[in-house]
Image (cartoon, rainbow, N blue to C red):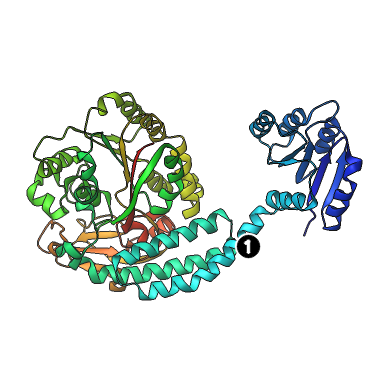
Amino acid sequence: MEKIRILWADDEVDFLKSHIMYLEERGYKVKSTTNGQDAIDKVIEEPFDLIFLDESMPGLSGLETLQELKKIRPNIPVVLVTKNEEEDLMEDAIGSQIADYLIKPVKPQQIILTIKKLTENKKLITEKTNKAYQQEFQRIFASIQSVNDYKEWIELYKNLIFWELELDSSQSHDMENIYNMQKKEANIEFNKFVTKNYIHWLNNPESAPTFSHNLLKNKVFNTIKEDKPTFFILIDNLRYDQWKTIQPYIDELFDLKEESMFFSILPTATQYSRNAIFSGLTPLEISKKLPQYWLFDDDEGGKNMYEKELLEYQLKSNFKDEVKSSYSKVIRQEDGMAVINNLNNLMKNKFNAIVYNFVDMISHARTEMEMMKELAKDDKAFRSLTVTWFEHSNLHSLLKKLAEKNVNVVFTTDHGTTQVQSPSKCIGDKQTSTNIRYKAGKNMQYNEKDVFVVKNPKDAHLPQANLSTTYIFAKEDNFLVYQNNYNQFSNFFKNSFQHGGISLEEMIIPISFYKSK
C-alpha cells in the first residue's frame, strides 16, 4: 500500500524527532518544516495526505498559514497543534475548517489515532460495515424466508434500507452485489406475499395495513384537533431510501414525533394512489360516488386535476364542523414561491396540503434524457440527485420559515419507484393503458409468471372502463412491453425508474410526523 505522506510544521521541530521516527517506523512518510511560509511552499511543490501545523510559529501564525493552505489545497486535512487551550482560539480554528485539534504535549498514540481517523477513516468504516453486514446477512436471509405478516415486511424493508445506506456511505463496493441479490430475493418473496393477501386486505380492512385511501383518516386527521395548523407535505414518487437521505435536513428544523409506514394501493401510480389519499376513497368508490372527478386511463385530460376537491370532500366526511384548509401543488419555481409568500394566510388554516411534483419529474426525465440517465443511473445516484434538489428547493426554504412558527408538519408520498430490468411481452388493444408497470384493458395477452392478474377489478376496488377490463401488475423488476417494436422499447426503458407495479420500493412508503422545536 502507498505510504501516507505527512507534513509537520513546527518551529520546535527538533523536539519532534522521536515522534517523526515513531511514525516512519510504522510506514508513514514524514517531512518537516520550521515555519508557515516553508509549509506553504512545500505544499505547492509536492502532494501531502495530512498536515500537522503548530499554532504558534515565528512569521505566519498557524491560523494564518492554515488560511493560505486552504486556498492551495482545500481538501488536505490539517491538524492544529498548540499549547493554547483558550476557547476563542479553538473556535477560530474550528471556523477555519481544521480537521482536528491536539494540545501539547502530544503522545505518539494520539498522533497515530488522529492519522488513522483522518486518512484511513473510510477504509476502517468500510471494513467494519462489511463485517457487520456479513454477520447480519444470514439473519436477514432467514427473515425473508419466514416473514408472514405485513408488519414484519415493513420492519424487514426498513432493515434492508438501513444496510443499503450504510454500505453506500461506507463505499463498500465489495458487498453491493451481495446486498442487491438479497434485496432481489426479498422482492420475490414480497410479491408472493402481496399476491396472496392483497384482495383479502382490501375487503377485510381490520386485518390490513393502512392503505392510501385510509391514510389521512387513520394517521393524519388527529393532528387537526390540536391548536395549531398542520402542514401535510406530499413529495410525489419518493421512496423510503430517498426519504432517509433528506430526513437529516428536516430533523435539524423540527422535532420528530413519529415515523411510520403505510402501503400504497395498486396500481402504485399517481392517478390511483394520490387520488385515494386525498379523497379517502378507493378508486372504485371515487368513480361511483364522485364520477366527475375520475378519468379512466384512456380518457383524455389530467388524471390528478381534482385533488383539492377530493380533499374537501374527505374533510367534510370526517368532521362535523368546517375545517379551514388549503391545497397547493408545486410544479414550477413560481408555484413554490407563491406558497412561501402566502405563508401568513396559510397559518390561519387548520390543514394545509402541499404537493411537490419534482421527484416524479426526475424519474420521467431520467427515462427520456441521456444526461439524466447518467445523473440518476442507479438507486445511489437517484438518492444523491434527490438530496441536491431538496437542499436548493423551495420546499427547504418553506420549511426554514415554518420552523420559526408553532406548527405540525407531516411528510409523506403517494408511492415509490423501482428500477426495472426485465422486459415482459404484453399484447393489448388501443384502449389498453400505456403504463409499463401495470396495464388495464381487455383481451390482453401476457406472461402470467411476470404479473399479478386481477380479472375482476371490483375485488381490488378498481373501476372498470368496460365489463371485460382486466388489470395486470408487473412483479419484481419486470416491465411490460408491447410485441411491436419490442427490442426498441425494451432497450429504451431498461434500467429506468418506474412505478405502478408490486415491489417493496413502490408499495411500502414512509409517513413522518414533526412538531416545532
The x, y position of residue 167, in whole percent, is: 54, 59
Q: Say which quarter of the image contains residue 203.
A: bottom left
Q: Is residue 95 above or below residue 106?
A: above
Residue 511 horizontal side relative to residue 252, left or right: left
Looking at the image, can residue 297 be seen?
Answer: no
Name the foreground residue: 442 vs 214: 214
The percent position of residue 57, horizontal first and vertical second, equals: 83, 30
Between 423 and 340, the one lying in front of the other is: 340
Residue furthest to the right:
14
> Residue 197, percent across and down?
23, 69
Kindly identify the residue that appears in the image at 84 percent across and 51 percent down.
29
Q: How many numbered callouts?
A: 1
Q: Residue at x 44, y 66 (%)?
A: 183
Q: Would you identify the image quadrant in which residue 426 lies? A: bottom left
Q: Where's the N terminus, which quadrant? A: bottom right
Looking at the image, which is closer to me, 365 or 60?
60
Q: Give the residue pinned by disc 1.
A: 127
Q: For residue 350, which quarter of the picture? A: top left
**Viewer-proximal residue, 432 or 248?**
248
Res. 246 in view: yes
Crowd around label 1: few <14 · some 14–19 · many ≥20 (10 Å): some
Question: Residue 85, position in %: x, y?
Answer: 71, 34
Please report the residue visible at 38 percent of the width from the left and 47 percent of the height from the top: 364
Left or right of 140? Residue 314 is left
